[in-house]
Image (tube, grey):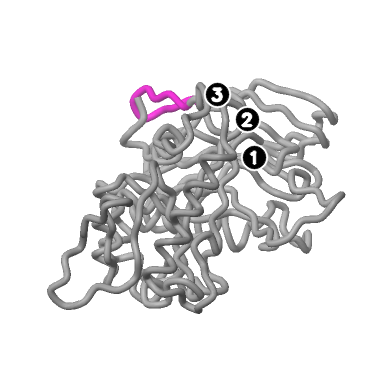
């Protein structure tokens, strides 16, 4: 892994929540730390989570926790008094946003090119979300890209796909909610929650990751290229044991062909095509139990597009590990 994006607690402080001045001072430290420890081979991309401990009023306003992912350093603090402008100028920081509502947050995101994912949908501080905001402008806004995907949400092996019930069902529900709208599809992003690591602790083996189609790492302090890839869904999510390095879906009238190169470690169990029509979710399972461990395969799968609004592709192995590409709307296929 050569991109690391710390997010939870990055601007927290001694106070709960921290004062605006403390929060902004901590952002100074966070951004400087990220730049100091980034180079041509490794990028630290400091992101920020809207949480009860740091920004409780905004958690209530936004509806659940939101992971804000920055294309460049952005300064903001919770609280906007009546008559106070959304943006003020400070000598050392430049623009500083004063946020007092969900509309303020969305406005800042649109102005600065920030995108957001909900890190733990339907659980913890996001219990009841994103369902409760699915009809709101902030959910439909292009800057809200989707949800987080992490282990600890389906590890009892009662599911044949990691985090099937919590994460993947939510992903499909979200895309049905925006079916027929100009809103782009909603995506899923690999995340993890680690607070303390010691010698011998293993991150990679127990953490899902995002494989971005990115030519090179960005310069420190400029994460625009990373945000661009995440915004357009040009990446796949994996537990590491299954990879989809190449994937295309091409359309000819009402027919399409999914083409994917897949690599894996444990024996495969199945590949699948998942779609929705705005109300229901359907899927086609392609058994793969005849394929041995440590293999690779080129898949070419036909798909009838009639009655479908969006479609996605995934592959799962015999241990429940998998990889999945992002959903695409049928209207956008060429």
Query: On the rendered structure, is 278 left or right of 261?
Result: left
Q: Vertical placement of 151 versus 265: above or below?
A: below
Kindly identify the residue that appears in the image at 27 percent across and 66 percent down. 98
Question: Marks 1/2: CA distance?
Answer: 7 Å
Q: Quickly name the residue at label 1.
A: 323
Q: Which mark is residue 11?
A: none
How many numbered dots are placed on residues in this image? 3
Which mark is first along the chain, 2 or 1?
2
Asked if one can make out residue 43 in the rendered structure from this viewpoint, the answer is yes
Image quadrant of residue 168?
bottom right
Q: Classify mark 1: residues with Cα within 10 Å, few (<14), some (14-19) or many (20+).
A: many
Image quadrant of residue 4?
top right
Query: On the rendered structure, is 177 left or right of 45?
Result: left
Image quadrant of residue 80?
bottom left
Which mark is first along the chain, 2 or 3?
2
Q: Quickly name the residue at label 3.
A: 259
Instruction: For the residues labelled 1 and 2, say whether their Cβ atoms are less than 8 Å apart.
Output: yes
Residue located farthest toward the left when viewing the structure as drawn: 83
Q: In the depicted view, which residue is nearer to us: 159 or 284?
A: 159
Kindly identify the residue that appears in the image at 65 percent across and 59 percent down. 193
Residue located farthest toward the front when viewing the structure as drawn: 91
> Tag 2, which secondary structure?
strand
Q: Quickly name the residue at label 2.
A: 244
Q: Which residues are magenta?
A: 249-259
Q: Is residue 305 magenta?
A: no
Which mark is first along the chain, 3 or 1?
3
In percent of width and height, residue 171 lies at 49, 54
In percent of width and height, residue 65 lies at 47, 67
Kindly identify the residue that appears in the image at 64 percent across and 40 percent down. 323
Asked if one can make out residue 308 in the rendered structure from this viewpoint, the answer is no
Q: Quadrant of the C terminus?
A: top left
Q: Classify mark 3: residues with Cα within 10 Å, few (<14), some (14-19) or many (20+).
A: some
């Amino acid at each position: 892994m050569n991109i690391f994006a710390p997010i939870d607690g990055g601007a927290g402080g001694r106070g709960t929540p921290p004062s605006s001045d403390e929060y902004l001072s901590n952002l100074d430290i966070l951004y400087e730390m990220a730049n100091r420890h980034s180079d041509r081979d490794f990028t630290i991309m400091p992101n920020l989570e809207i949480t009860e401990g740091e920004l409780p009023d905004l958690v209530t306003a936004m509806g659940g926790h939101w992971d804000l992912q920055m294309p460049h350093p952005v300064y903001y603090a919770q609280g906007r008094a009546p008559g106070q402008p959304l943006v003020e100028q400070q000598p050392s920081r430049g623009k500083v946003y004063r946020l007092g509502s969900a509309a303020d947050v969305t406005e800042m995101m649109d102005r600065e090119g920030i995108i957001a994912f909900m890190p733990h949908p339907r659980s913890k501080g996001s219990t009841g979300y994103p369902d409760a905001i699915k009809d709101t402008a902030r959910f439909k806004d292009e800057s809200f890209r989707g949800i987080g995907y992490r282990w600890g949400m389906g590890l009892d092996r009662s599911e044949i796909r990691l985090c099937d019930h919590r994460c993947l069902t939510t992903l499909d529900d979200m895309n049905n909610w925006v079916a027929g709208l100009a809103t782009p599809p909603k995506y899923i992003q690999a995340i993890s929650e680690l607070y303390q690591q010691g010698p011998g602790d293993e991150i990679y083996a127990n953490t899902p990751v995002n494989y971005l189609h990115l030519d090179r790492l960005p310069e420190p302090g400029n994460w625009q290229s990373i945000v661009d890839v995440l915004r357009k869904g040009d990446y796949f999510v994996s537990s590491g044991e299954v990879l989809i390095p190449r994937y295309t879906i091409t359309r000819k009238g009402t027919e399409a062909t999914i083409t994917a190169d897949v690599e894996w470690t444990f024996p495969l169990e199945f590949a699948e095509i998942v779609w929705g029509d705005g109300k229901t979710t359907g899927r086609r399972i392609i058994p793969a139990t005849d394929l041995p461990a440590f293999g690779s395969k080129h898949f070419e799968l036909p798909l009838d597009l009639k009655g479908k609004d969006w479609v996605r592709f995934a592959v799962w192995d015999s241990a429940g590990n998998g990889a999945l590409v992002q959903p695409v709307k049928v209207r956008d296929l060429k």
